Image (spheres, coloured by chain):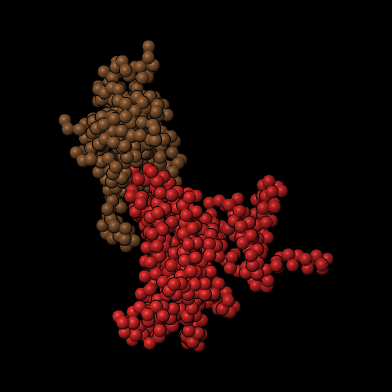
């Protein structure tokens, strides 16, 4: 009997280690597998068996659909996590960056229907813009090329550029947006699979470019990456310093970055949802649904597709800049194709074309991914299996866009539209 | 009367195939002009040339005295040309109202950043656009279905929604590609009524239609294409009795 219990405990504990989230992730996997088994064996799942599951799902959906509840969780979560040590917080911060990326990619893939497999390029461009202009990396170049033009004192007491994040954040975003337009122009005529392959190529080109740009002039420092990147500093407050205190409490660096990114997410979601419910968002949706009909309806599809790339790139670039500041170092290896795929999975899992979906998709997929490092490469396999399961069970994603548009909200008060139609329909 | 739309020796070749062979056509302001012909005669290609989806190999197309061959579709929409498609092309996963609002796009001018800030003029314009959109839905008889997904409408109403979407851009010239295809006799009669009502709003109609009852009933003038060539043009009675037209439809010796 006791050996049975031991086996059961071992089964529930799972192979991913002792971390509570690792155990939880395993149990989610287990539950999913069990669910699928039951479905396969019985053909149909008994209602009683799934009642708790459905209740939990409903509860989660209510909480997740309420933006204030989400915000409250976002605000309080790191404080809870501080009690368990810094590791959880650093992972949560990574997930946050992915939320930003997912919301950005959702513009391109979800709203406009352009399958972009090279989104990591925008992240990389933003990261390198900050990395190069807020580190000693460009010291040699500036010394050689601008020595006669710029007095060394203009470059500050430390070698290289050290421009503030306040300046570089929008610059990084704009650089990535410009990059989006540059990638967008040659791919305007491509649709579907062809677009996916070309954007995938551009993503890889960007990474390899950064990898090789240490010759003939050392700009990116090649595979070794840019090191000693400045932490964000506002006034005398350094985000990267472990010496910050609030009363008796020490503020770890990741907490600073966490709240900064949270602020950025709020701003991004605000801007993107305003765009979604305007003529721009309608035009994007029209391009997604039928590009030819959209053109004939008066939409300049070229400009609006480029605007989608630029907007997606802008938010991806800002995420990259903050990533570079938080990590202190960036290397081409951080910008693998897998990042693009992971973000795309988040958008698809959350529900294409839905902003809350992108946020929740990034949180769920990100948590499953980052809290299971013990799985090593196996986690990509498990991850794939989970996505297949998701597509079988819930193809529309966690929170599909509720087909409620701004124009519909305002017709609710009009009683003549709600009343039953008198006489025969036309 | 000066023609609103004029095609002069317009030719379109796809590889070796001559889809439109040096065709001259002119549509006058305020009339209902129909283009008929057997399948594959090049009628839809003519529409694609006029709406900018295809560029003519040679020849000129003028709209209100302005050369328009080769202009982009969205520019032509702004100039006042709208169309529907033979195979209905709606934005299926958008609401009925959303479809008409997209049709309104060419008449909205607020800069994109204003949508983020929601400036007073942007809100005003959006409100205005929704009112107009509802007007057009009312006009085609779809007002009560405005919240439905376009995909969920029955076929006949999808045709009407496509017309409403085209009307929303406030065109001066409306091209309808087989609007009566697949509809029953009652719907055809209602459609003819709708087309007259559109004409009465001052919109010129350029029509492709296979249903002779509809064509002969409402057209002011009719042109016939066969193998890319115009074989007849004139008032419905003349065209009906034209020898070449009868041959094209029924074969020689008929």
Q: Residue at x 65, y 72 (%)?
A: A19
- Left/right placement of residue B182 relative to residue A254 reads left
Of B213 and A323, the residue lying toward us: A323
Which chain, by letter, is brown?
Answer: B
Q: Quadrant of residue B248?
A: top left
Q: Which of the 4 image quadrants contains residue A83?
A: bottom right
> Among all residues in the image, which is located at the extreme top?
B253
User: Does residue A131 lie above or below B90 as drawn?
Assistant: below
Residue under the image location 39 percent in, 78 percent down: A141
* Residue in the image at 35% along x and 74% along y: A167
Where does the image place residue B38, in percent across and percent down from the top left?
A: 38, 24
- Provide the letter of the chain coloured red: A
Q: Is B244 left or right of A244, judged from the image as shown?
A: left
- Return the x and y of residue A100 as percentages of the image width and height: 46, 65
- Name which quarter of the figure residue A185 lies in: bottom left
* Relative to A184, B202 lies left or right: left
């Amino acid at each position: 009997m006791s050996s049975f219990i031991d086996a059961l405990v071992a089964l529930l504990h799972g192979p991913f280690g002792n971390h509570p989230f690792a155990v939880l992730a395993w149990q989610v996997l287990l539950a999913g597998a069990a669910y699928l088994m039951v479905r396969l064996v019985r053909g149909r799942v008994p209602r009683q068996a799934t009642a708790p599951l459905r209740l939990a799902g409903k509860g989660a959906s209510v909480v997740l659909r309420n933006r204030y509840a989400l915000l409250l969780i976002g605000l309080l979560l790191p404080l809870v996590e501080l009690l368990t040590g810094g590791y959880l917080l650093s992972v949560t911060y990574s997930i946050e960056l992915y939320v930003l990326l997912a919301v950005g990619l959702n513009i391109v893939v979800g709203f406009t229907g352009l399958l972009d497999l090279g989104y990591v390029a925008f992240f990389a461009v933003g990261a390198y813009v900050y990395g190069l202009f807020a580190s000693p990396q460009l010291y040699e170049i500036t010394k050689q090329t601008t020595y006669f033009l710029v007095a060394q004192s203009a470059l500050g007491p430390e070698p290289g550029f050290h421009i503030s994040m306040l300046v570089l954040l929008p610059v990084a975003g704009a650089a990535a947006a410009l990059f989006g337009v540059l990638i967008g122009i040659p791919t305007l005529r491509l649709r579907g699979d062809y677009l996916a392959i070309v954007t995938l190529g551009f993503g890889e080109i960007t990474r390899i470019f950064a990898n090789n740009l240490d010759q003939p002039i050392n700009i990116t420092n090649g595979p070794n990456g840019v090191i000693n990147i400045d932490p964000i500093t506002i006034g005398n407050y350094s985000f990267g310093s472990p010496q910050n205190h609030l009363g008796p409490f020490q503020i770890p660096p990741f907490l600073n970055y966490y709240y900064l990114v949270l602020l950025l997410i709020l701003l991004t979601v605000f801007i993107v949802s305003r765009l979604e419910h305007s003529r721009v968002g309608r035009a994007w949706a029209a391009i997604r649904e039928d590009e030819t009909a959209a053109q004939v309806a008066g939409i300049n599809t070229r400009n609006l597709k480029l605007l989608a790339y630029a907007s997606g790139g802008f938010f991806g670039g800002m995420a990259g800049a903050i990533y570079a500041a938080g990590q202190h170092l960036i290397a081409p290896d951080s910008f693998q194709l897998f990042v693009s795929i992971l973000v795309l999975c988040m958008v698809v899992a959350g529900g294409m074309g839905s902003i809350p979906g992108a946020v929740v998709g990034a949180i769920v997929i990100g948590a499953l991914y980052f809290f299971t490092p013990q799985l090593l490469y196996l986690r990509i396999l498990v991850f794939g299996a989970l996505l297949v399961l998701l597509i079988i069970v819930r193809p529309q994603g966690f929170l599909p866009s509720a087909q409620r548009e701004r124009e519909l909200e305002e017709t609710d008060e009009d009683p003549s539209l709600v009343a039953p139609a008198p006489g025969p329909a036309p | 009367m000066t023609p609103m739309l004029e095609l002069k020796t317009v030719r379109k070749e796809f590889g070796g195939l001559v889809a439109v062979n040096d065709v001259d056509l002119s549509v006058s302001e305020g009339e209902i002009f129909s283009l008929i012909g057997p399948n594959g005669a090049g009628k839809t290609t003519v529409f694609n040339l006029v709406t900018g989806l295809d560029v003519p190999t040679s020849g000129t197309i003028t709209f209100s005295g302005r050369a328009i061959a080769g202009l982009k579709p969205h520019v032509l929409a702004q100039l006042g040309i709208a169309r529907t498609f033979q195979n209905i092309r709606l934005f299926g996963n958008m609401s009925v109202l959303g479809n008409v609002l997209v049709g309104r796009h060419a008449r909205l001018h607020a800069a994109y950043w204003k949508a983020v800030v929601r400036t007073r003029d942007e809100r005003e314009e959006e409100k205005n656009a929704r009112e107009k959109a509802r007007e057009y839905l009312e006009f085609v008889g779809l007002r009560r279905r405005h919240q439905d997904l376009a995909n969920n409408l029955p076929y006949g109403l999808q045709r009407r929604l496509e017309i409403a979407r085209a009307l929303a851009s406030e065109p001066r010239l409306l091209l309808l590609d087989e609007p009566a295809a697949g509809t029953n006799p009652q719907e055809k009669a209602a459609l003819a009524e709708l087309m007259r009502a559109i004409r009465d709003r001052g919109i010129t109609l350029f029509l492709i239609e296979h249903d002779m009852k509809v064509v002969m009933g409402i057209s002011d003038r009719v042109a016939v294409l066969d193998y890319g060539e115009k074989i007849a043009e004139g008032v419905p009675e003349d065209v009906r009795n034209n020898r070449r037209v009868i041959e094209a439809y029924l074969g020689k010796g008929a």
